[in-house]
Image (spheres, rainbow, N blue to C red):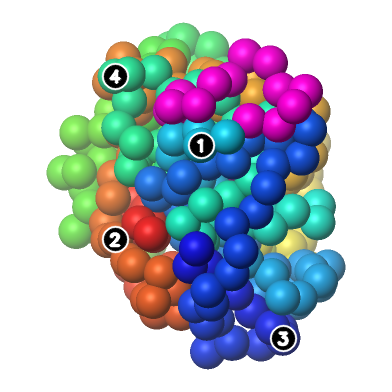
């Protein structure tokens, strides 16, 4: 089979397509013929060694969707021909999904309902599961609450807008003007240009004086902002930052409102199958649509990883082997 591999850590140019033996599933694994594999920033961190370096040669790719080709001897509940999707694949010593076939432990993959698109599901994993964990598990978002999603056009952001809308929360999101109509169509009640000078005032006006939950992907930019626009008891869930030293300029704004902060990584999810099943249900019932901005072949993996870090687009990028 063909697989993208890196033989050393470095920039995107270290990625190459090799002809390798098709893997054999372990007792608790599935062999999946990959239909689509999402492109995520985290894939580049494993490639360049920013995250704990993986053993090389290594195939990147955390997300996948496809059809079961073979099952391990101890596997129950899956059969050849089943449509499946999952995430957390290329982590913890496992080879990833930028390949024609991939082996997947059954604790990070679920069945894909017939109503869900296979390619969209391949791009859904990290983005949609992160959004689910942030809003449903950590923020405990309730109907009619005001929810602020920073960066609504991104992979996690556009999934979070829809998940918030699916639980009948009142979603406020930020994005460039190019994507405002799209984000409203995805379920945002209010869309604001993130570059406006009066953004905090606009958020407060749109939320009757303060937000109940925040999904923040750039804590170094918005940690103080989140406290300033919070309602009493607001839950702020932080999923990332550009600089590793976010800080308050006035923590009294957070203390005076009993703001709760939760920083998270999707890889700490106790059982990935729980949010995956929730995401699968939303996709099957058309409550969640993964916007596919661009598709690539295996030979274009280097370009795909450069684009995911440098380009502006709505939704997700995906490899279709």
In this view, the residue in front, 18 or 275, is 18
Label 4 – label 2 distance at C-alpha: 21 Å
- For marks 1 and 3 on the same chain, the one whose residue lies earlier in the sequence: 3
Camera sees residue 195: yes
- For marks 1 and 2 on the same chain, the one whose residue lies earlier in the sequence: 1
Q: Which residues are magenta?
A: 71-87
The quadrant where residue 184 appears: top left
User: Of the numbered discs in the image, which one, if any, rests on residue 8?
Assistant: 3
In this rendering, the label closer to the viewer, 1 or 4 = 1
At label 4, counting other C-alpha atoms closer than 10 Å, the crowd grade (few under 14, some 14-19, many 20 or more) is few
Q: Position of residue 90 (x, y in %)?
A: 67, 55
Label 1 – label 4 distance at C-alpha: 21 Å
Tag 1 residue: 69
In this view, the residue in front, 22 or 248, is 22
- For marks 4 and 2 on the same chain, the one whose residue lies earlier in the sequence: 4
User: Of the numbered discs in the image, which one, if any, rests on residue 115?
Assistant: 4
Label 3 – label 2 distance at C-alpha: 25 Å
At 19% from the left and 33% from the top, the residue drawn is 185
Q: Mark 3: which secondary structure? A: loop
- For marks 3 and 4 on the same chain, the one whose residue lies earlier in the sequence: 3
Q: Mark 1: which secondary structure? A: strand
Label 1 – label 2 distance at C-alpha: 23 Å
- For marks 3 and 2 on the same chain, the one whose residue lies earlier in the sequence: 3
In this view, the residue in front, 51 or 199, is 51
- For marks 1 and 4 on the same chain, the one whose residue lies earlier in the sequence: 1
Magenta region's main secondary structure?
Answer: loop
Tag 2 residue: 295
At 71% from the left and 31% from the top, the residue drawn is 72
At label 1, counting other C-alpha atoms closer than 10 Å, the crowd grade (few under 14, some 14-19, many 20 or more) is some
């Amino acid at each position: 089979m063909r697989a993208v591999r890196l033989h050393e850590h470095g920039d995107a140019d270290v990625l190459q397509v090799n002809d390798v033996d098709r893997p054999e599933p372990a007792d608790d694994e599935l062999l999946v013929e990959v239909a689509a594999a999402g492109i995520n920033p985290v894939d580049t961190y494993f490639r360049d060694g920013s995250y704990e370096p993986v053993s090389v040669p290594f195939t990147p790719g955390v997300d996948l969707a496809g059809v079961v080709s073979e099952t391990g001897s101890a596997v129950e509940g899956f059969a050849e021909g089943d449509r499946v999707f999952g995430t957390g694949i290329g982590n913890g010593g496992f080879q990833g999904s930028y390949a024609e076939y991939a082996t997947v432990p059954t604790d990070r993959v679920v069945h894909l309902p017939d109503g869900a698109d296979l390619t969209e599901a391949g791009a859904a994993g990290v983005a949609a599961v992160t959004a689910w964990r942030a809003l449903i598990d950590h923020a405990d978002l309730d109907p009619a609450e005001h929810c602020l999603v920073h960066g609504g056009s991104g992979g996690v952001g556009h999934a979070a807008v829809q998940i918030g809308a699916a639980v009948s929360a009142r979603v406020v999101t930020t994005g460039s003007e190019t994507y405002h109509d799209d984000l409203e169509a995805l379920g945002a009640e209010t869309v604001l240009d993130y570059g406006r000078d009066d953004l905090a005032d606009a958020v407060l006006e749109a939320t009757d004086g303060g937000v109940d939950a925040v999904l923040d992907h750039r804590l170094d930019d918005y940690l103080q902002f989140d406290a300033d626009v919070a309602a009493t008891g607001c839950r702020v869930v932080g999923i990332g930052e550009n600089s590793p030293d976010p800080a308050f300029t006035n923590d009294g704004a957070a203390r005076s409102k009993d703001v709760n902060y939760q920083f998270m990584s999707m890889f700490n999810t106790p059982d990935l199958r729980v949010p995956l099943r929730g995401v699968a249900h939303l996709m099957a019932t058309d409550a969640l649509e993964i916007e596919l901005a661009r598709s690539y072949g295996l030979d274009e993996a280097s370009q795909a990883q450069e684009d995911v870090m440098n380009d502006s687009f709505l939704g997700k990028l995906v490899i279709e082997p």
